[in-house]
């Protein structure tokens, strides 16, 4: 598992979108018992905090202590620094295991071996994520498309392809549960939009290798903008037993 976000932990926590309640509701429909949940690759707890009200105990793990230190605290949530592929949890322990916007960084074979070991016989495994944002504002949306597909071409980690392919091409050796398509919708300021884009790993890679700012054209277009932007993200969602 790669750790690409420790150096931007506070920005990541501030700028990354939160998941809608509808995702949690869909998962909970299929979870029979709600004693133990494991949120793996939890980062700064965006998804962990949504599980907390429904389970007696939630364990959230991540490779990055810096990320976990940004996560909100709850009495029933324990945060642990550990790789996704290695843990000392008891076998058949969890009613639910979730991975939100992180599965593409894992070693699938090693991680799935652990999932099958620690998941209860009737437990649920859910993979959640979100794809490339779309804006209703066509001018700004075109600039983001240019940034993503052209300016940052060659700067994305190879694993990003799984997001572009909507998690449909990841190995998924589980009995799959059918899910309707969902999306996340927000209204963001120009500042919120730029903060989010600055969390992209490819932006970080670009800046290390170049002296110019890959966001300069977007910043110019958004300069002094008081406008709010309607933003949509397609939700990537696989669930199984």
Image (cartoon, grey):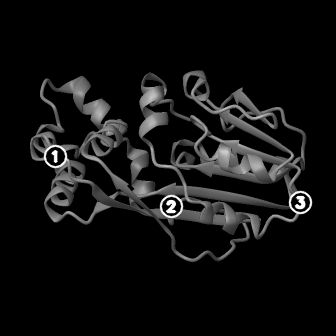
Badge 3: residue crowd in 10 Å (few <14, some 14–19, many ≥20): some
**Location of residue 54 in the rendering, given as x and y in whole percent from the top left corner:** 79, 53
**Location of residue 38 in the rendering, given as x and y in whole percent from the top left corner:** 75, 44
**Residue shown at 52%/50% (left/top)?**
18
User: In the rendered view, does 58 fall on the left or right side of 183?
Assistant: right
Q: In front: mark 2 or mark 1?
A: 1
**Residue shown at 54%/54% (left/top)?**
19
**Residue shown at 56%/59% (left/top)?**
20
Q: Are marks 2 and 1 in contact (CB under 8 Å)?
A: no
Residue that numbered label 1 is attached to: 225
Residue that numbered label 3 is attached to: 33
Q: Dot 3 lies on which element?
A: loop
**Location of residue 228 in the rendering, given as x and y in whole percent from the top left corner:** 27, 54
Q: Quadrant of residue 46?
A: top right
Residue 173 visible here: no
Report the quarter where the C terminus lies. Answer: bottom right
**Location of residue 231 in the rendering, given as x and y in whole percent from the top left corner:** 34, 59
**Mark earlier in primary sequence (3, 2):** 3
Report the quarter where the N terminus lies. Answer: top right
């Amino acid at each position: 598992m790669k750790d690409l976000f420790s150096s931007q932990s506070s920005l990541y926590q501030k700028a990354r979108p939160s998941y809608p309640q509808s995702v949690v509701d869909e998962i909970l429909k299929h979870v029979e018992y709600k004693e133990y949940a494991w949120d793996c690759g939890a980062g700064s707890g965006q998804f962990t905090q949504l599980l907390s009200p429904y389970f007696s105990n939630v364990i959230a793990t991540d490779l990055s202590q810096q990320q976990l230190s940004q996560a909100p605290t709850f009495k029933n949530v324990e945060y642990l620094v550990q790789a996704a592929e290695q843990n000392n949890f008891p076998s058949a322990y969890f009613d639910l295991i979730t991975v939100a916007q992180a599965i593409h960084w894992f070693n699938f074979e090693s991680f799935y071996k652990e999932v099958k070991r620690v998941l209860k016989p009737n437990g649920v495994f859910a993979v959640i994520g979100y794809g490339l944002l779309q804006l209703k504002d066509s001018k700004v949306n075109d600039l983001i498309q240019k940034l993503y597909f052209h300016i940052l071409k060659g700067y994305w980690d190879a694993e990003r392809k799984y997001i572009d392919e909507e998690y449909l091409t990841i190995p998924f050796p589980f009995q799959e549960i059918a899910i309707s398509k969902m999306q996340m919708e927000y209204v963001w300021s120009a500042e919120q939009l730029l903060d989010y884009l600055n969390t992209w790993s490819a932006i970080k890679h670009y800046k290390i290798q170049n002296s110019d700012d890959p966001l300069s054209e977007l910043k110019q277009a958004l300069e002094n903008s008081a406008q709010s932007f309607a933003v949509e993200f397609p939700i990537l969602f696989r669930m199984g037993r």
